[in-house]
Amino acid sequence: MESENVAEAMSPGEATKSGPRPADRHGLLKHSREFLDFFWDIAKPEQETRLEATEKLLEYLRARPEGSEMQYALKRLITGLGMGRETARPCYSMALAQVRW
């Protein structure tokens, strides 16, 4: 008889609904959706969206100067400097330069 791993037999959505959650390799589950969306918006092609997201991210981090958000933000901003989208790099750079840690 062939044994099958239950997590492999289910789709990712099913596994999170009925069973244990998938491994959180990057600590993303600690952060709110709003916080994570700042990084997606910084990478968008529209300049106004990028600038607004950068400003909101900085406001968010100034309200919470310590904790996992600051560490995660620094990691994401540094990684963002090497992004393939040239238009996103200046906003990542600007945000990184203005983060107070």
Image (spheres, rainbow, N blue to C red):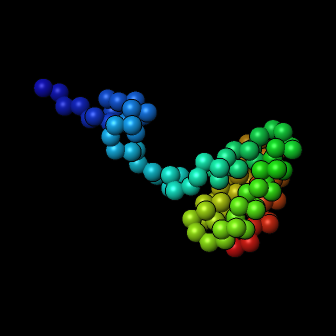
**Residue positioned 70% across, 50% down in the render:** 38
Residue lying furthest right in this view?
48
The residue depicted at 64 percent of the width and 65 percent of the height is 70
Q: Decide if residue 56 is in sight here.
A: yes
Q: In this view, does 6 lie above or below 66?
A: above
The location of residue 64, given as percent across then percent down, is 66, 68
Q: Is residue 22 left or right of residue 80?
A: left
* Tally of numbered discs: 0
Quadrant (top left, top right, bottom left, bottom right) of the C terminus: bottom right
Q: Is residue 7 toward the left or the right of residue 29 in the image?
A: left
Give residue 63's position: percent from left, percent from top.
70, 67
- Position of the N terminus, as image quadrant, is top left
Residue 18 x, y percent position in the rendering: 34, 37
Is residue 86 at all visible to an observer of this figure?
Answer: no
Q: Residue furthest left?
A: 1
* Figure quadrant of residue 67: bottom right
Q: Where is residue 54 in the image (x, y as percent from the top left)?
A: 78, 54
Q: In this view, does 42 lie above or below 77?
A: above
**Residue drawn at point x = 39 percent, y = 32 percent:** 14
| Residue at image coords 52%, 56% | 30
